[in-house]
Image: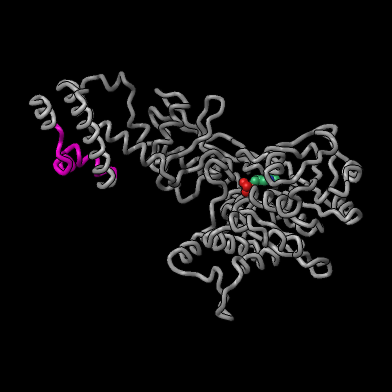
Amino acid sequence: MKDREHLYQLLPQVGEYLDSGEGRKLTQRFRRQEVRDALRAEVARLRQAIQLGQLIKDELEQRLDELPLSLESILQAGTSQALRPVVNATGVMLQTNLGRAPLSERAIERIAQVARGYCNLEFDLHSGERGERGAHVEHVILKLLAAPAPRQPIQQSALIVNNCAAATFLALNSLAAGAEVIVSRGELVEIGGGFRIPEILEKSGARLREVGTTNRTRIEDYAAAATPDTRLILRVHPSNFRIEGFTHRPTLDELVRLGQRTNLPIFEDQGTGCVVDMRQCAIGETSSLLRSARSGAALVAASGDKLLGGPQCGILVGDRIIVDRLRTNPLYRALRVDKLTYAALDMTLLAHLEGDLDSIPIFHMLNMPADLIRDRCERWVQRLDGATLRAEVVAAQSVIGGGTTPGISVPSYAVELTHADIADEELARRLRDLTPPVIARVTAGRALLDLRTVGEEWDATLPGLISESLERNRSPIEREKPA
Ligand SMILES: *Cc1c(COP(=O)(O)O)cnc(C)c1O
């Protein structure tokens, strides 16, 4: 018992420890409150181990010697797991794991304004009465997507939900629960992140009626499959792969005509949300939300944070009567978005309406000339190339990513980093340890920084930060040499 009392006395006082040399080193790097909490938890753990007789004096002393290190690793893990900004040097513009589309400055400003106080989310400023959530944004979407005046056949409506997966789910549930949906076998795809068309369909309560084959489905296959139990024809944009060779797939227009003949609504999961002619961006023709929305399809779903370049959300556009069935489904209440999403989406749509593509980061990156990227790489190399860390400019290929334009890449340049003492994977790990973490592309034993996806605002500071952190690191042999 007396022994234990003695051991307890070795435990540090939290307040004293925080003001000691070791404590100060930690509070300079982490928030004082976090250091204090971590320290309290560690001391409590040691106290309990003493109480249970699990620690003898030597062991306790060793644990106390290691206390600064264990606190540091606890605090480090805490911050590194928190959501925080990273530098995307992978050259993948819509990197799903890194949060897909960055937002425009205008969108960010509007989010901040709306978040700071109250807003007219469900309030009509004219009448002073309750208003329709999202009515304004839905109006702007229709303005952006509406066909030119002579071709405005049916009254359209729009609806925003949490993401494109939610949009598809809500559509299938609202329009086809308990009945059949016709889908081509070539479109029973997995989009990524566990979004599989057959599974979503089953969960929605609809029944899958597969037609055609993996590589070839004809319009007659759809026509032959329709029964009185059919409610919908689903067409899915194969966004993250390409089938080449002996293939056939009816166009959306063919399906729309079939739908008119058979009185079956066509629902297209368009996915990319692209409203820009990608030929302008030196990308070939791609699937387009604009074209789909004007095709006469009953309903189209797309993502807000792919090629639209806005916040995560799902955009539904279609015949007013159909969209109203989705809006009045109780599930919509569970899938709707918050005011911050409307704020960001509104500003993104406005930029598209004004044709101000450069203000949307994904298009700013995509349209950045390769020559400009090479110049930036050269300036980075001048600051980075040293004795142990070597840097050179190499040609690279950027991709849009996010399951939008499979097989298409854009010529770019990158800074290739090599290190005298550490291999590429370890080099990439050290880059991730920086603040901000830098995510490099590692291929074929090379660590590359593709500057297309790295904002120009980093050019002034990041090369210095990288060089400082990696040049400072000497090899173990050098470290053992007497000073
Ligand atoms: C990306 C994509 C989805 C999923 O979109 P989220 O917004 O991530 O839910 C669904 N369908 C298609 C065709 C897609 O390209």
Classify 151 as above or below 431. Answer: below
Q: Residue 317 occupies which quadrant of the picture?
A: bottom right
Question: Which secondary structure type mostly characterizes the magenta part of the structure?
Answer: helix
Q: Is residue 397 left or right of residue 384?
A: right
Query: Seen from this angle, which residue lies furthest bottom?
Result: 127
Q: Quadrant of the C terminus?
A: top left
Answer whether residue 411 is visible to the viewer in this image. Answer: no
Residue at left 55%, top 80%? 128
Residue at left 54%, top 68%? 121
Nearer to us in this view, 27 or 192: 192
Picture coordinates of residue 74, whole percent (x, y): 32, 35
Picture coordinates of residue 322, whole percent (x, y): 75, 60
Inspect the magenta stretch and tell me whether residue 27 lies in it. yes
Classify 8 as above or below 168. Answer: above
Identify the image's colour scheme: rainbow, by chain, secondary structure or one colour: one colour
Q: Residue 403 occupies which quadrant of the picture?
A: top right
Picture coordinates of residue 85, whole percent (x, y): 44, 47
Q: Is residue 355 left or right of residue 296?
A: left
Picture coordinates of residue 481, whole percent (x, y): 25, 19
Classify 93 as above or below 448. Answer: below
Q: How many marks?
A: 0
Nearer to us in this view, 10 or 199: 199
Q: Quadrant of the N terminus?
A: top left
Answer whether residue 97 is visible to the viewer in this image. Answer: yes
Residue at left 79%, top 57%? 298
What is the magenta range?
A: 11-30
Inspect the magenta stretch and tell me whether residue 24 lies in it. yes
